[in-house]
Amino acid sequence: MRYKALDDLGLPTIVVWVVVSTLIPKQGWCAAAGVGEILSEDYEVRAAGQKVDVYTARVLDPPFAGKQWDYGGAYSFANFDMPGRVEVRIVSKRSLRNVVIRPRSYGIKPTLEDDNTLILTLEKPRKLSIEPDGRKAPLLLFANPLETDVPKPGDEGIVYFSPGVHKPEKIILGSDQTLYLAAGAVVKAEVLARGSNIRIHGRGILDGSDWQWRTGPVGNLIAIRNSTNVEISGITLRGSSHWTIVPKNCRRVTIRNVKICNSRVQNDDGINPCNSQDVLITDCFIRSDDDCVALKGLDFSGRNSNVERITVENSTLWCDRARIFLLGHESRAKFMRDITLRNLDIIHFTMTPFLLEPGEDMRLQDVTIENIRIHGEGQKQFIRLRPVVNQYMRKKVPGFISNIRFKNVTVEGQSGDYLVQLQGADAEHNVRNVTFENVSIIGSGLTEESKPARIGKQTQNVRFRAESQ
C-alpha cells in the first residue's frame, strides 16, 4: 500500500507497508503485542478475565540518567477498552501492600488479594497511576471507552497499521487523510500533518524512543503545521525525543483520550499549542520530564499568530522535572488569551505547576483555572504570575498579565511552602485583576495574609474570596 505526500508540500514520498491481521473483537479488551516488543516483567493485568498486554516506558536515557530528577527507572503502562463495569486484576513481583491509586479524587479502593495481587472495579473509563512506591516504576492503567469508527485496511485516505512493530520512521499526512494505529500496533515514527480534515486515531502506540534526544526525523512526535480541523484520539505516545504534540499556526485542533508516556529525555513537553486558536485538550493523561502543556507564541508567520481559545480539561497530569503549565516563554505573539484549564488532577510535579511569565510585550489575559486537584509532596512553588525577560526572548522587554481567575483549586498532601507569587516588572508591565476563589493549601484557605502569599509590587486589584459570590 503506498501513500504519497502532497506535491505542493515539497516533502519526500513515504511508502508504508502494513501487514493485515485479524481485528480485535468488537467487545474486545486488547490485541496481542507484536513480535519484537519487549513487555513489562513488573506487572500482569487482566480485565474481565482477559489478559491485557503491559508495555514499558524508559525514564531518563543518558546523559540525563542519575540526575536530580531521576525517580527510579522504567515504568509500565497498559490499555484496554471497557464496554461497562469491569473488574481488573493486577499481579506484581513487587509488594502491593502499600499501593496508592491516583488520582485520589476517583475514590477507587482496591481489594488486596495477597501481597502481590490486587483487585479493583471500574464503573467507567479511567486513567490511573497504580503506585506501589510513589513515582518509582508505577503501572499506568488506561481504561478506554469502546472504540468506534474503526477503518479497514485499504479504505480511501487511510494509512493503516495493524498489530505488530512497524518502523516507517516518518509519516506525512495531507488533507483528508487518516492515520490509524490498531490495538497492538507499535509504530516507530514521527508524524508531520499539514492540511485540513486530518485524523490520527486508534488504540496503538506511536513510539519515538528509538531516537536520541532531539534527533527525530520530523522534530516532534506529532508535528501539526498550518492545519485546520485536526483530531488526535485514542492512541498512546511513548518516549518522544523532543516536544511531543505541537500544533503550530493551526485552527480547530482536538486532542482527546491521548496517553503520553514520556520522561525519557528533557525537552519532551507533552502538548505545545503554538500560535494556534481553538485547541481542545480533553480526557488525556500526560507524564513528561519537561512541561506537560506549554502555550507558545513563537513567531508572526501565520495570518493570526495569537494563542487564543485554548482549553485543557478532564485530564490527569504528571511532570517529573519542569512545570505542569507554562504560559508565556518563547512567545512573541501579540496576545495569549481566552485560556481555560478545568477539572484536572495533578498527581506529581516538581517545579511551579502554574507558571505565567509573558515577555516581549505579549499580553497574557483572560485565563480561568478552576476545579483543580493537586497532590503535594512538600514543594516550594505553586503559582507564579510575573512578566519577565529571559534567555528565550528576542525582544528584551517584559509582557503583561491581566484578568486571571483561580477557582476551586486544592493542594493536598505533605506540608510545604507552596508559594503563590505575583510580581509586576514595572509600572507598565504589571499584574492586574487576579482573583483567588476557594483556593486551599493543605487544608487552609488562601488569603492575602496566608504564609504562601507573596503579593509584590506593580500588582493591581488582587482579590481573595473564601467562597463563590
Image (cartoon, helix red, strand yellow):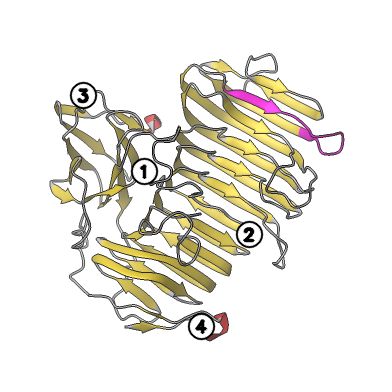
Quickly name the residue at label 1: 59
Considering the numbered disc 4 on the image, is that residue within a helix, a strand or a loop? loop
Magenta highlight range: 418-432
Considering the numbered disc 3 on the image, is that residue within a helix, a strand or a loop? loop
Q: Position of residue 390 (x, y in %)?
A: 71, 42
Mark 2 crowd level (few <14, some 14–19, many ≥20, 10 Å Cα):
many
Quickly name the residue at label 2: 276
Q: Amino acid at mark 2?
A: Ser
Left or right of 84? Residue 13 is right
Quickly name the residue at label 3: 97
Looking at the picture, tell me which residue is in the foreground, 46 or 263.
263
- Spatial separation of the CA atoms under disc 2 and disc 4: 23 Å
- Spatial separation of the CA atoms under disc 1 and disc 4: 37 Å
Quadrant of the rendering where the C terminus is positioned: top right
Residues at badges 2 and 4 in contact (C-beta under 8 Å)? no
Residue drawn 41% across the image and 59% down it: 233
Mark 3 crowd level (few <14, some 14–19, many ≥20, 10 Å Cα):
some
Looking at the picture, tell me which residue is in the foreground, 454 or 437.
454
Q: Amino acid at mark 1?
A: Val
Q: Please tell me which of labels 3 and 2 falls first in the chain.
A: 3
